Image: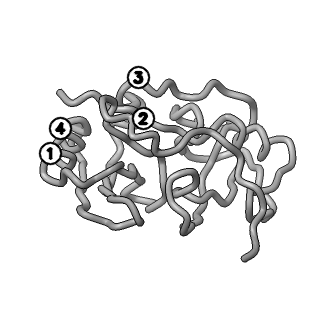
Amino acid sequence: MLPIRVVAIPTEVAEAVRATMRAPVYEHPAHAEVGSDAAPCRHCLRLITPGERRILFTYDRFAQVESLPLPGPIFVHGQACPRYPDGAGFPEELRASPRTLEAYARGRQLLAKKYVEDGKMEEAIEQLFAHHPAADYIHVNSTTAGCFTFRVERQAARRNIGEATVPTASPR
């Protein structure tokens, strides 16, 4: 099995959104609500259960990885939560829901897309990296909602794709 590194959004981003109720870089207002359904927190990669407070905000899935942005909506817990550990493998709580895996090379070049509904995420990730050696990382997205969940990198390669920094505002 290929060792992978699961990369949740940086703690600094989650904390900044909770403190300011604004999306980093874009400064769009964040939206807080008590959810009526479950949704994954992009920081701890656990489910935000119905009845828990959650914050919806705009996030660039390519932050710290590519220069061209692709913003979209994501959730975090309304209260502080620990960041998902890089070496913990695929998050068990997210295994049962359908995911779309997108393998990218540098320059935001989409190499392949794979839909996984049977929970065999590691097998699908390994196949994408094996069949597409130019792939630098894989975005794991919700198949039902289409939104970004987290990034996966090869653990051994550790190509230093990007680390936790809060992006500053830039001209639009």
> Would residue 41 be visible to someone looking at this image?
no
Circle 4 sits on which residue? 123
Picture residue at 36% right of the left edge, 57% below the top: 143
- SS at mark 4 in the image: helix
Q: Residues within 10 Å of mark 3 (few under 14, many from 20)?
A: few
- SS at mark 3 in the image: loop
Q: Earlier in the sequence, mark 1 or mark 4?
A: 4
Closer to the camera: disc 4 or disc 2? 2
Closer to the camera: disc 3 or disc 1? 1
- SS at mark 2 in the image: strand
Circle 3 sits on which residue? 88
* Of residues 3 and 119, the one drawn nearer to the viewer in this rendering: 3
Image coordinates of residue 51 in percent, x first then y, are 67, 37
Circle 2 sits on which residue? 6
Image coordinates of residue 161 in percent, x first then y, are 46, 45
Picture residue at 81% right of the left edge, 55% below the top: 22
Circle 1 sits on which residue? 130
Q: Earlier in the sequence, mark 2 or mark 1?
A: 2
Picture residue at 59% right of the left edge, 59% below the top: 60
Picture residue at 77% right of the left edge, 47% below the top: 17
Q: Tell me which amino acid carries mark 3.
A: Ala
Image coordinates of residue 144 in percent, x first then y, are 40, 59
Q: Is residue 30 left or right of residue 132?
A: right
Closer to the camera: disc 1 or disc 4? 1
Q: Is residue 27 left or right of residue 7?
A: right
Q: Earlier in the sequence, mark 2 or mark 3?
A: 2
Q: Tell me which amino acid carries mark 4.
A: Glu
Q: Earlier in the sequence, mark 3 or mark 4?
A: 3
Disc 2 to disc 1, C-alpha distance:
17 Å
